[in-house]
Image (tube, rainbow, N blue to C red):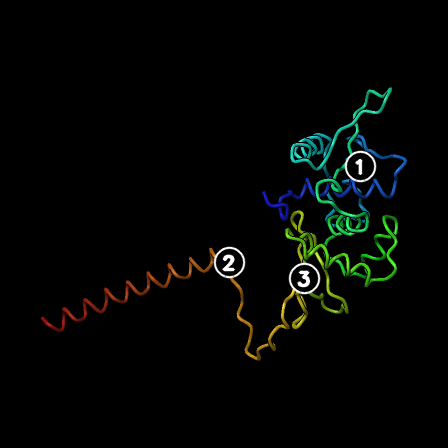
């Protein structure tokens, strides 16, 4: 199964919270189910904000364990089970890459400058260029884990999203903003023609069906007219 896009929104939130707390509150890590539920439902540093119950978190943890993303452990002398991620083992990621992926998963599309600020408690990057270097390395993997989605209106830097699971909704990028792909040639000049509104596959099929019905009706009307003329 492909790694990219394989996690559900719930799995992505739980996994990203485990990564976050491993770096930001190491004394309290691994996490109990209750602590992890609280982390998932934080109202700060989260986009979107969610309201998970312990049962949902437990069910999600089971799915993550089955897929090899998480392990359950019990400390010596303790009766409570706790949970830790094994993203480093599964994907072979360095701490700086884990930090970038976790913040993208928890807070949606962000620029390298935003990521530099928001990963300070995970890993200290020298500058936004160092963050972008990590983002590009993740995008160049055989199974890409990040993607450049261009700039938002008023922003000077391109934004990036993670590809471990569903990304938060992103506004349309500013016209002309670049989309990074490995070894990609420079994009052609933008056309001066008016943009054509996009449509989903279902909408296009519906339009075709409506046109086919109208064409059939016209053919029937023309056939009747020809018959009347011959008579």
C-alpha separation, residue under disc 3 versus residue under disc 2: 20 Å
Q: In the rendered picture of this protein, how many numbered marks are placed on residues?
A: 3
C-alpha separation, residue under disc 1 versus residue under disc 3: 31 Å
To which residue does mark 3 refer? 149
For image coordinates 66% across by 47% down, the residue present is 165
Name the one closer to the observer, 160 or 50: 160
C-alpha separation, residue under disc 1 versus residue under disc 2: 38 Å
Q: Which numbered disc covers residue 200?
A: 2
Q: Are marks 1 and 3 in contact (CB under 8 Å)?
A: no
**Dot 2, how many residues are within 10 Å of its Cα: few (below 14), some (14-19), or many (20+)?**
few
The tag earlier along the polypeptide, 3 or 2, is 3
> Up-down: is 6 above or below 58?
below
To which residue does mark 1 refer? 38
Name the one closer to the observer, 230 or 196: 196
Q: Quadrant of the C terminus?
A: bottom left
Q: Are marks 3 and 2 in contact (CB under 8 Å)?
A: no
For image coordinates 70% across by 52% down, the residue present is 162
Image-quadrant location for residue 177: bottom right
**Dot 3, how many residues are within 10 Å of its Cα: few (below 14), some (14-19), or many (20+)?**
many
> Up-down: is 48 above or below 170?
above
């Amino acid at each position: 199964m492909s790694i990219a896009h394989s996690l559900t929104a719930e799995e992505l939130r739980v996994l990203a919270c485990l990564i976050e707390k491993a770096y930001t509150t190491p004394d309290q890590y691994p996490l109990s189910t209750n602590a992890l539920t609280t982390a998932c439902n934080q109202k700060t540093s989260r986009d979107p904000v969610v309201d998970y119950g312990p049962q949902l978190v437990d069910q999600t943890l089971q799915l993550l364990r089955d897929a090899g993303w998480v392990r359950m452990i019990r400390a010596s002398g303790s009766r409570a089970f706790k949970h830790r991620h094994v993203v480093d083992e599964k994907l072979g990621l360095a701490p700086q890459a884990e930090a970038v992926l976790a913040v993208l998963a928890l807070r949606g599309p962000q620029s390298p400058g935003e990521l530099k600020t928001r990963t300070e408690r995970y890993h200290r990057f020298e500058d936004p260029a160092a963050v972008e270097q990590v983002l590009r390395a993740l995008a160049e993997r055989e199974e890409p884990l990040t993607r450049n989605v261009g700039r938002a209106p008023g922003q000077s830097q391109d934004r990036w999203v993670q590809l471990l699971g569903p990304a938060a909704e992103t506004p349309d990028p500013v016209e002309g903003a670049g989309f990074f792909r490995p070894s990609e040639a420079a994009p052609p000049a933008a056309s001066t023609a008016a943009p054509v509104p996009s449509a989903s596959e279902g909408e296009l099929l519906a339009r075709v069906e409506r046109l086919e019905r109208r064409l059939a009706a016209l053919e029937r009307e023309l056939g009747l007219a020809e018959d009347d003329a011959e008579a």
